[in-house]
Image (cartoon, grey):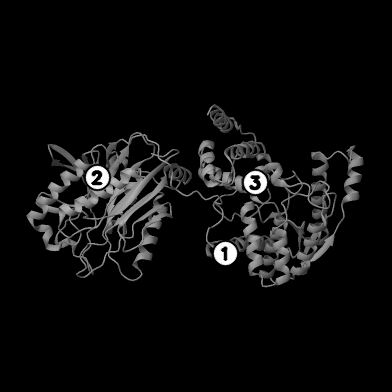
C-alpha cells in the first residue's frame, strides 16, 4: 500500500507453452512472486494464460481441463500469505459447457470467476467453437468444498482501502459496443482488469493503446490490460504482449511489444474519486445487480514509483508542447475575436510593460486582429513609465510594439501619481502598499480613458497564477474589458512566449521575446537598484512553479494539503527542500482563500485548459470562506516535522 490513495497495479505477460499447464503455472507464480516483492496490490495475467490461448481443439480434451484444475490449485496455494489480488485466465467447465474465465485469487483462496461475455467468431477468431458466452447473472459453483461466485457482475471490494473496487472483463469484451466495464464502473468499480489475448496486425497496437486509454477516460477509472505474448502458437498468428496501464485517459505504463514481462504503475484512487464527484453527469447505478466480494490489503509502507510532474500544466515533449501552445493561442485569440465582433470594436488598448504577461496579451491581440483583417496599427500599446520602470523593460516594450506593427503610445505617469500622493497625503518616500497600488490604479485609469477616446477595448494581461494568489491590485491591473490570459498559469505563459519566439520567423522579434523571457518577473512598482529590477515577485510570494503545482492539484482534484505537500516533495526533489515547499504551500492557501474577493468580480476571459478561476465557471467559491481546515493540516505537518 502507498499513502494518499495510491495503489500499485501490475499487468503481466508470462512465457507460455501451449497446453503445458505445469510450465505455465510456474511462470505465472514467478511473476506473482515478483509482483509481491514490488508491492503490487492488483495483478492481471493474460486470457487463458494457464493453458495458453491457442490450444484450439485441445480445449475440449479432458486431460487438459483436469490438469488445469490441478495446477490452478497449486497456483492458489502459492498465493497463501500474500494479499495481492491476482486475475488469471483459465478455461472453466460448468454444466457441461466451457467458459473463458478470469479467476480472481488472493491469499490462498479462489474469490470469484468472471466469464468472458462477448465471444468473437470472425476473421481469425473461432472461440465459439469451444466457449460459451458468460452470463451477467451470478451463480455459485463448487470448488474445493466451497461455492464460488461465477458471472460477469462480480466486483471485488477492498474493505480497508477507500475507493478500491476491482472489476474484470476479458479481451473482446472491451472491443464491443457495450463493454461490461461500463456497468462495472457505474456500479462502483475504480479499477478494471482485462485478461486479453489480442494478436498483432499492422496498426493494431496504436488502436489498442487508444482503446484502453479511451476506456479509462470514459469510465474515469484505472484500466489494467494484460495481453498474451511470446510462447503462444505462431501457426497463424503472432502475439506481442503490449501490456497497458491507463488512468483516466493517461497511459501510466506500457510494455514493449514482443517482450514478455511485467509493467507496474501507481494509480491514484483519490484522483478518480474526485473526477467522478466533480462530473455530475457520471452515472452511478446498478449496484444492486452485483455481487460484491470483500477482500483486505495489508497496510504496509511502499515507496511510490509514480513520476510526479513538477509542471503539470506544461506537456513534456517538445512536439506536444508546441501543439498545446498553438492550441492555447488559438483559443485566446478566438475568444477575443468573438468579443471584438460582437461589440463592433476595431481598436484595442494594451498596457505593455516589457514583462511576460503583457507580451503574451499583445501577441494574442495581434493574432485576433489578423484573423479579423483589422490593421495592427489599431492596437494601441501603452507604455507607462513610473518609479520602478527599468531601461531594459522599457526598451523591450517599445521594440516589441514596433516589431508587431502596433501603435506605441507613451504616458509617463510619475507626475500624475505624485499629484495623487499629495491629494491623499502619501509620503513618496514611504514605499508601502499604497505607494505601489496607486501606480497600478493610475495605469489602469490611463488605459481605460485612452480606450474611451479611441472607442476601443482594454485587453487584460493578468494570468491565472496571479489571480489564484491575488497578486493584482484591486481595480488596478485586476480590471480590464476582456482578460485574455485569465486561465493561463505563469509556467505556461513562459512556454507560449517562447513558442512564439521560435515560430515567428523574424529574428529581431524573436530576440526581443527571448530577452523578455530572461527578465525577472516584477510589477516594477519600487525604484530600481543600480538600474536593475528591485522588486522580484517570486522573492515575495514564492516560486511560481511551486504555486502552479499547488494550484493544479487544488483546482483539478481537490487534494488535501498533506497529499499535495508529499507530491511536491517528490516532484521537486533536489530543487526545493521540505521547509521551503511547506512554507510556500501555507502562503498559497492563505492567499488563495483571502483573495477570493478579487476573483469574484473578474472580467470576462476565455478558459483554455482543464482548470480556471472564473467565478462564473470553475471556481464558484465564497469570498469569505474560512481556510482553517486546510491550514490546520499544514500546521500539523509542521509539528510532525519538528518532532521528527
Q: Which of marks 1 and 3 is in front?
A: 3
Q: Which residue lies furthest to the left in this view?
A: 62
Is residue 338 visible from the viewing direction of this image?
no
Q: Are marks 3 and 2 in contact (CB under 8 Å)?
A: no
Q: In this view, does 402 lie to the left or right of 158?
A: right
Q: Where is residue 313 in the image (x, y as percent from the top left)?
A: 56, 53
Instruction: Find numbered disc 2 in the image and state the secondary structure of the residue it sits on.
Output: strand
Instruction: Find numbered disc 1 in the image and state the secondary structure of the residue it sits on.
Output: helix
Q: Which of the pair 394/276 is nearer the observer?
A: 394
- Callout 2 crowding tier (Cα within 10 Å): few <14, some 14–19, many ≥20: many
299 is higher (above) or lower (below) than 34:
above
**Residue occupying the point 64% across, 48% down:** 544
The residue labelled by disc 3 is: 543
Q: Which of the pair 204/24 is nearer the observer?
A: 24
- Callout 1 crowding tier (Cα within 10 Å): few <14, some 14–19, many ≥20: some
Q: Position of residue 308 (x, y in %)?
A: 50, 48
**Residue occupying the point 31% across, 64% down:** 258
Q: Which mark is residue 104?
A: 2
> To which quarter of the image does residue 493 belong?
bottom right
**Residue occupying the point 69% across, 46% down:** 538
Amino acid at each position: 500500500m502507498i499513502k494518499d490513495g495510491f495503489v500499485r497495479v501490475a499487468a503481466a505477460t508470462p512465457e507460455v507453452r501451449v497446453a503445458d499447464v505445469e510450465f505455465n503455472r510456474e511462470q505465472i507464480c514467478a511473476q506473482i512472486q515478483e509482483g509481491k516483492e514490488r508491492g503490487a496490490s492488483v495483478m492481471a495475467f493474460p486470457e487463458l494464460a494457464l493453458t495458453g490461448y491457442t490450444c484450439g481443439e485441445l480445449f475440449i480434451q479432458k486431460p487438459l481441463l483436469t490438469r488445469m484444475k490441478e495446477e490452478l490449485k497449486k497456483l492458489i496455494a502459492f498465493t497463501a500469505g500474500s494479499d495481492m489480488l491476482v486475475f488469471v485466465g483459465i478455461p472453466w467447465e460448468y454444466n457441461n459447457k466451457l467458459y473463458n474465465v478470469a479467476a480472481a485469487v488472493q491469499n490462498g483462496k479462489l474469490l470469484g470467476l468472471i466469464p468472458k461475455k462477448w465471444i468473437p467468431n470472425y476473421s481469425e477468431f473461432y472461440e465459439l467453437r469451444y466457449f460459451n458466452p458468460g452470463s451477467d447473472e451470478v451463480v455459485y459453483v463448487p470448488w474445493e468444498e466451497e461455492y464460488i461466485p461465477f458471472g460477469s457482475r462480480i466486483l471485488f471490494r477492498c474493505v480497508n482501502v477507500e475507493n478500491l473496487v476491482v472489476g474484470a472483463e476479458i479481451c473482446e469484451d472491451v472491443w464491443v459496443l457495450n463493454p461490461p466495464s461500463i456497468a462495472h464502473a457505474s456500479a462502483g468499480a475504480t479499477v478494471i482488469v482485462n485478461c486479453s489475448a489480442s494478436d498483432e496486425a499492422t496498426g493494431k497496437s496504436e488502436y489498442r493503446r487508444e482503446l484502453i486509454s479511451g476506456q479509462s477516460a470514459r469510465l474515469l477509472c484505472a484500466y489494467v490490460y494484460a495481453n498474451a505474448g511470446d510462447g503462444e502458437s505462431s501457426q497463424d498468428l503472432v502475439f506481442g504482449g503490449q501490456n497497458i496501464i491507463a488512468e483516466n485517459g493517461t497511459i501510466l505504463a506500457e510494455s514493449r511489444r514482443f517482450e514478455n514481462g511485467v509493467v507496474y504503475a501507481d494509480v491514484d484512487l483519490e484522483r478518480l474519486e474526485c473526477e467522478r464527484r466533480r462530473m455530475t453527469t457520471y452515472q452511478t447505478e446498478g449496484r444492486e445487480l452485483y455481487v460484491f466480494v470483500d477482500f483486505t490489503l495489508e497496510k504496509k509502507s511502499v515507496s511510490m514509483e509514480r513520476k510526479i510532474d513538477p509542471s503539470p500544466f506544461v506537456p513534456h515533449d517538445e512536439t506536444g508542447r508546441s501543439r498545446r501552445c498553438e492550441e492555447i493561442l488559438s483559443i485566446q485569440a478566438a475568444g477575443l475575436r468573438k468579443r471584438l465582433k460582437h461589440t463592433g470594436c476595431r481598436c484595442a488598448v494594451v498596457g505593455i510593460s516589457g514583462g511576460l504577461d503583457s507580451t503574451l496579451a499583445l501577441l494574442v491581440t495581434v493574432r485576433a486582429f489578423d484573423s479579423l483583417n483589422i490593421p495592427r496599427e489599431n492596437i494601441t500599446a501603452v507604455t507607462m513609465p513610473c518609479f520602478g520602470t527599468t531601461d531594459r523593460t522599457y526598451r523591450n516594450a517599445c521594440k516589441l510594439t514596433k516589431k508587431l506593427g502596433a501603435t506605441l503610445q507613451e504616458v509617463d505617469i510619475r507626475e500624475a501619481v505624485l499629484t495623487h500622493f499629495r491629494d491623499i497625503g502619501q509620503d513618496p518616500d514611504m514605499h508601502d502598499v499604497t505607494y505601489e497600488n496607486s501606480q497600478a490604479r493610475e495605469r489602469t485609469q490611463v488605459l481605460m480613458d485612452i480606450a474611451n477616446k479611441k472607442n476601443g477595448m482594454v485587453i487584460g494581461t493578468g494570468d491565472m497564477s496571479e489571480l489564484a494568489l491575488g497578486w493584482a491590485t484591486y481595480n488596478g491591473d485586476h480590471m480590464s474589458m476582456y482578460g485574455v490570459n485569465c486561465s493561463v498559469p505563469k509556467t505556461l505563459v513562459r512556454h507560449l512566449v517562447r513558442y512564439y519566439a521560435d515560430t515567428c520567423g523574424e529574428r529581431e522579434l524573436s530576440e526581443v521575446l527571448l530577452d523578455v523571457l530572461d527578465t525577472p518577473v516584477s510589477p516594477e512598482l519600487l525604484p530600481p537598484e543600480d538600474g536593475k529590477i528591485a522588486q522580484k515577485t517570486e522573492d515575495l510570494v514564492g516560486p511560481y512553479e511551486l504555486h502552479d503545482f499547488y494550484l493544479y492539484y487544488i483546482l483539478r482534484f481537490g487534494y488535501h494539503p498533506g497529499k499535495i505537500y508529499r507530491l511536491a516533495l517528490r516532484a521537486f526533489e533536489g530543487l526545493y527542500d521540505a521547509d521551503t515547499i511547506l512554507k510556500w504551500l501555507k502562503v498559497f492557501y492563505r492567499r488563495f482563500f483571502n483573495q477570493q474577493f478579487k476573483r469574484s468580480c473578474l472580467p470576462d476571459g476565455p478558459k483554455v485548459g482543464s482548470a480556471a478561476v472564473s467565478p462564473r465557471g470553475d471556481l464558484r467559491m465564497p469570498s469569505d470562506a474560512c481556510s482553517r481546515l486546510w491550514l490546520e493540516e499544514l500546521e500539523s505537518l509542521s509539528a510532525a516535522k519538528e518532532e521528527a
